[in-house]
Image (spheres, rainbow, N blue to C red):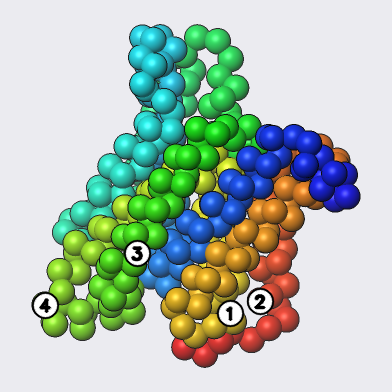
């Protein structure tokens, strides 16, 4: 870890990586709390894996058709939003089993993404980074995009906090009081989609759900208030990301894997050693 802090002042890519962890922690803390409280982790998983379709299609278009605007991150955003709307509408209105549809979207998204990746000429190293995560490769442009996404996520949460809280804790009562619960449930899934896009460059699609849910689950063990849970979750996410980055630097280990492993170990220790806060 000492080696990491020495290198931090010398290398811009390490500074970008650390800042990315902080920015990603904001999204994790805010949206991860909704995911844990509303118990929609499986939906979030379907949205995350469906975004691979957008990554693959955008990368294919940028390489084969030379469409410079077709950036993988933009494709992931579009695919994640479409997946969130589809899953939300099915959950609200369709007679089909919710878990079956989510599993289908999960599988289709992965299949479409891999299909387009396989048909793209050359070695798709950047796509593999999006799939498995490489926080050390985050660019200045990526940082600004994550900042914008964070502003959108925090802004929408602040504007509709009461409505989202009502949908999360007592949807039936909120519906009786005349609140358009379906609309706010779809908004919640859209926030999950935006957070998935925020985290794609940090830990990759494969591990994004862990970072989205584990910090909020840990925070939920210590606090009863929703805002406090978000603040705790944000701090825990930032701490885990920063510590995982520092621990992985010296031995030259995959940063994303170390971050998630660390998060999982901390969560297990918390569950085993502390009682859950009463709600």
| Image spot of residue 67 (x, y percent) | 36, 14
Residue at mark 1 to residue at mark 2: CA–CA distance = 8 Å
C-beta proximity under 8 Å, tags 3 and 4: no
Which residue corresponds to the image point at 11% horizontal and 77% vertical from the top-left? 178
| Residue 200 sits above or below residue 279 on the image | above
Residue at mark 1 to residue at mark 4: CA–CA distance = 32 Å
> Local crowd at mark 2 within 10 Å, few (<14), some, or many (≥20)?
some
The residue identified by callout 2 is: 271
The residue identified by callout 4 is: 178
Which residue corresponds to the image point at 81% horizontal and 40% vertical from the top-left? 7
Q: Is residue 115 visible?
A: no
Between 204 and 238, the one lying in front of the other is 238
Which residue corresponds to the image point at 47% horizontal and 21% vertical from the top-left? 117
Residue at mark 4 to residue at mark 2: CA–CA distance = 38 Å
Provide the secondary structure element on which disc 1 rests.
loop
Q: Is residue 179 visible?
A: yes
The residue identified by callout 3 is: 157
Residue extending farthest front: 9
Q: Is residue 249 left or right of residue 47?
A: right
C-beta proximity under 8 Å, tags 1 and 3: no
Splitting the image into 4 quarters, where does residue 128 fall? top right
Residue at mark 3 to residue at mark 4: CA–CA distance = 20 Å
Provide the secondary structure element on which disc 3 rests.
helix
Question: Mark 1 or 4 closer to N-term?
Answer: 4
Question: Mark 4 or 2 closer to N-term?
Answer: 4
C-beta proximity under 8 Å, tags 1 and 2: yes
Between 139 and 215, the one lying in front of the other is 139
Provide the secondary structure element on which disc 2 rests.
helix
Q: Which numbered marker is on residue 221?
A: 1
Which residue corresponds to the image point at 45% horizontal and 76% vertical from the top-left? 227
| Image spot of residue 46 (x, y percent) | 40, 48
Splitting the image into 4 quarters, where does residue 104 fall? top left
């Amino acid at each position: 870890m000492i080696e990491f802090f020495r290198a931090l002042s010398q290398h811009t890519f390490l500074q970008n990586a650390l800042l990315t962890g902080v920015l990603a922690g904001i999204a994790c803390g805010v949206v991860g709390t909704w995911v844990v409280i509303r118990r929609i982790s499986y939906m979030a998983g379907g949205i995350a894996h469906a975004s691979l379709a957008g990554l693959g299609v955008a990368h294919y278009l940028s390489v084969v058709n030379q469409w410079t605007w077709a950036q993988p991150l933009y494709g992931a955003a579009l695919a994640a939003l479409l997946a969130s709307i589809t899953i939300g509408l099915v959950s609200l209105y369709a007679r089909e089993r919710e878990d079956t549809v989510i599993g289908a979207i999960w599988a289709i998204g992965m299949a479409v993404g891999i299909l387009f990746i396989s048909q793209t000429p050359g070695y798709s190293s950047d796509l593999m980074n999006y799939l498995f995560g490489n926080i050390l490769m985050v660019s200045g442009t990526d940082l600004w995009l994550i900042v914008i996404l964070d502003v959108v996520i925090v802004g929408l949460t602040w504007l509709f906090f009461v409505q989202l809280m009502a949908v999360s804790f007592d949807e039936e009562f909120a519906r009786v009081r005349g609140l358009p619960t379906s609309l706010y449930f779809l908004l919640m899934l859209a926030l999950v989609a935006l957070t998935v896009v925020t985290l794609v460059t940090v830990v990759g699609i494969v591990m994004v759900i862990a970072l989205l849910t584990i910090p909020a689950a840990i925070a939920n063990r210590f606090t009863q208030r929703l805002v406090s849970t978000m603040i705790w979750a944000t701090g825990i996410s930032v701490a885990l990301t920063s510590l995982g980055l520092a621990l992985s630097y010296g031995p030259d280990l995959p940063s994303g894997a170390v971050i998630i492993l660390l998060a999982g170990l901390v969560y297990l220790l918390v569950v085993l050693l502390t009682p859950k806060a009463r709600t």
